[in-house]
Image (cartoon, rainbow, N blue to C red):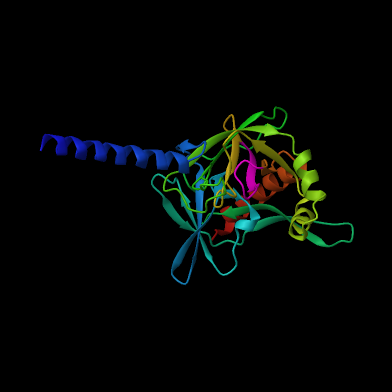
Amino acid sequence: RTAMTRFLLLFFLLRVFNTVMDLQKRIIGGQQCERPYHVKLRGVNAGRSFNLCGGTLISSRWILTAAHCLKPGRTMFADLNVHPAQEVQIRAEPVIYADKDDNNNKRFHDIMLLQLPSSTDIKPMALPNCENRPKIVHIAGHAATTGGPNSERNGKASPTLQCAEMDVVDCSTYKNSLKNSNNPDTIEFYNKKKYQHWFCGAAPGVDTCRGDSGGGVVANNMIYGVIAFGNNIVRHRPAAFMDLCHPDYEKWITDNISSKEKVCGLFGCG
C-alpha cells in the first residue's frame, strides 16, 4: 500500500509539472500585467461575441487603435480597465486616418480613433515625446506572445493581459523583402502598406499575435505606436507598429481629439 501511495503521489506531481510546462510553452516571452489604460475591443453579431483587438485610452473620451479592427456588421464594445472590465458600447462613427495618392484617390491608413459615449476617470496614456524616441518599447494584448508547437501564431485569447518588451529595430530589410516578393498576396499587402508610416520591434522569442492588433506600443509612460501587423511564424520577422511620431499622425490625433471633445461638450455625444 505504501508503494502504491508513493507511485500515485509521484504520478500526481508529474502531471502538475507537465501542466506547468505546457503553459510555459504556450506563453512565449510575455507575462501577466496590469495596464489600466489598455482597452479590449469586442465585436458582437447575431448574439455571438468576438475578440477583435486591443486599444489604448489616450484621453477621457478617446481610444486609439488600428483601423483594420473595424469589422462591418458587428456592434463594437470596449472593455475598459480589463481587471475587471467596464463594458461600453461604441456608438459614435469611428475616425480613420486617410489621405490621397498622386491621382487624388483616397487611401486609408491603419490607425483609428473611437469615441466613448461619456468620459471615464481611468488615467489615459500620454501622447509621445517625439524628440526623445525610445530604443525599447513594451507591448500588451490578450493574445500577445502566444505561439503554437511549430512557432506559428496561435489565435487563442489569453484570459489575462500579457505584456512583453521589444527592441526598436530597423525596418528596411523587412520592407525590402515585402517589396521584392514574387508572391501575389505579399505584393498586394505591400502596396497597401508602403505609403503608411510604421516602425518595427523585435526580441528573442517575443512577438505579437492575432487579437493584439490595435494595442499600444509604449515607453516611459507614453504611447509611441499602435500594433499593426506581423508574420505567421513567431519571431520570423519584426512586428510592425504604426508610428505615432510621424507629423501627419500626430497632428491628426490632436486635431480630432480637441475639436470633437469641444463639440461633445456643447451638444452631447452618443
**Is residue 230 one of those drawn in magenta?**
yes
Measured from the top left, where is residue 178 in percent x and y?
77, 49
Q: Which residues are magenta?
A: 222-236
Residue 27 location (% of width, % of height): 47, 41
Q: Nearer the viewer, residue 86 or 180?
A: 180
- Residue 173 image position (x, y, % from top left): 77, 39
Residue 150 image point, x, y percent: 55, 47
| Along the viewing direction, whichever of 213 and 124 lies nearer the viewer | 213
- Toward the bottom, the furthest residue is 46
166 lies left or right of 180: left
Quarter holding the N terminus is top left
- Residue lying farthest left? 1
The image quarter containing residue 138 is top right
Residue at 65% over, 55% down: 67
| On screen, residue 113 above or below 246 | below
In depth, the one of 33 and 133 nearer the eye is 33
Of residues 74 and 114, which is closer to you in this image? 74
- Residue in the picture at 57% in, 46% down: 215
Query: Horizontal placement of 9 versus 200: left or right?
Result: left
Q: Is residue 195 visible?
A: no
Residue 13 image-quadrant placement: top left
